[in-house]
Image (spheres, grey):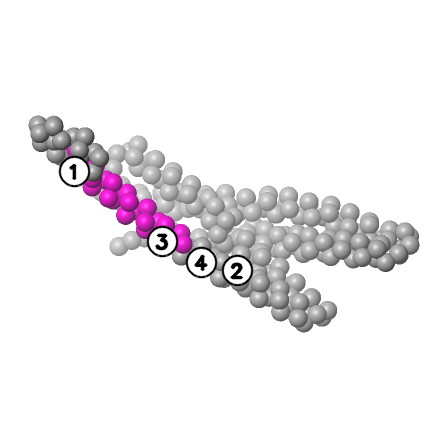
Amino acid sequence: MKTRLKFQVDKDLLLAIVVGVCGSLVALAMFFLSGYMVTQSALGAPLYALMILVVTVKLFGFLRAITRYVERLISHKATFTMLRDIRVQFFGKLVNVIPNVYRKLSSSDLISRMISRVEALQNIYLRVYYPPVVIGLTALVTVIVLAFISIGHALLIMVSMLFTLLIVPWLSSKKARTLKKHAANEQARFLNHFYDYKAGMDELRRFNQINHYRDN
């Protein structure tokens, strides 16, 4: 019976999502105000009317940097917490089967496998779960706010975000599975060819067919 490791959603991850959404909204607001300021200046607005926009854009740029730093700090803390919990769970489940494990693996092989398998999960929050959630919530807030200004543009943003969050990852995962299957088949073919070559080395050498076998 296979045992599964449980991923726990802690407060650091939720806080990182909130800060990430706030940072994305601040960045969008900064781009909006920058475009609005350029438009007003092109229309000949006086300088004193643009001072508030200039100060607001600079403030949003400062807030964007702060939220980006805090978001990275909290999200990495959540990742380290997740790795700690996984190591504890992995060791707790490993203790019960240590006699059977040592019949198959040496201690050094077991440690290297444990480290590599656990470290492979360090990007599961930062690269897999976290970005789609932040992008989805940011897009939702953007569509709701934009719907009060222009329904057509809100629908366009919604369709593009759905395509980005659903269709593109599905196509990418499908292509990745195809490439992985092709790589596995090529690796199996190469290993079979190599082991066949090693097993028949004496016969090939006896009949002087080593170069012919390599070429084929």
Query: Label 4 is placed on what type of residue?
Result: Leu
Mark 3 → mark 4, Cα distance in angstroms:
11 Å
Q: Residue 7 at what x, y percent from top left?
A: 44, 53
Q: Is residue 33 left or right of residue 164?
A: right
Dot 2 alpha-carbon crowd within 10 angstroms: few under 14, some 14 to 19, many 20 or more = some
Instruction: Looking at the image, tell me whether mark 3 or mark 4 is earlier in sequence order.
Output: 4
Q: Residue 132 at what x, y percent from top left?
A: 53, 56
Residue that numbered label 1 is attached to: 196
Residue 178: which disc?
3
Residue 89: which disc?
none
Residue that numbered label 2 is attached to: 165
Q: Is label 4 in a helix, a strand or a loop?
A: helix
Quadrant of the drawing holding the N terminus: bottom left
Name the residue at 66% across, 67% down: 153
Instruction: Looking at the image, tell me whether mark 4 or mark 1 is earlier in sequence order.
Output: 4
The stretch drawn in magenta includes residue 176: yes
Q: Between 202 and 207, which is closer to the camera in this rendering?
A: 207
Residue that numbered label 4 is attached to: 171
Dot 1 alpha-carbon crowd within 10 angstroms: few under 14, some 14 to 19, many 20 or more = few
Mark 4 → mark 1, Cα distance in angstroms:
38 Å
Name the residue at 70% across, 70% down: 150
Mark 2 → mark 4, Cα distance in angstroms:
11 Å
Query: Label 3 is placed on what type of residue?
Result: Thr
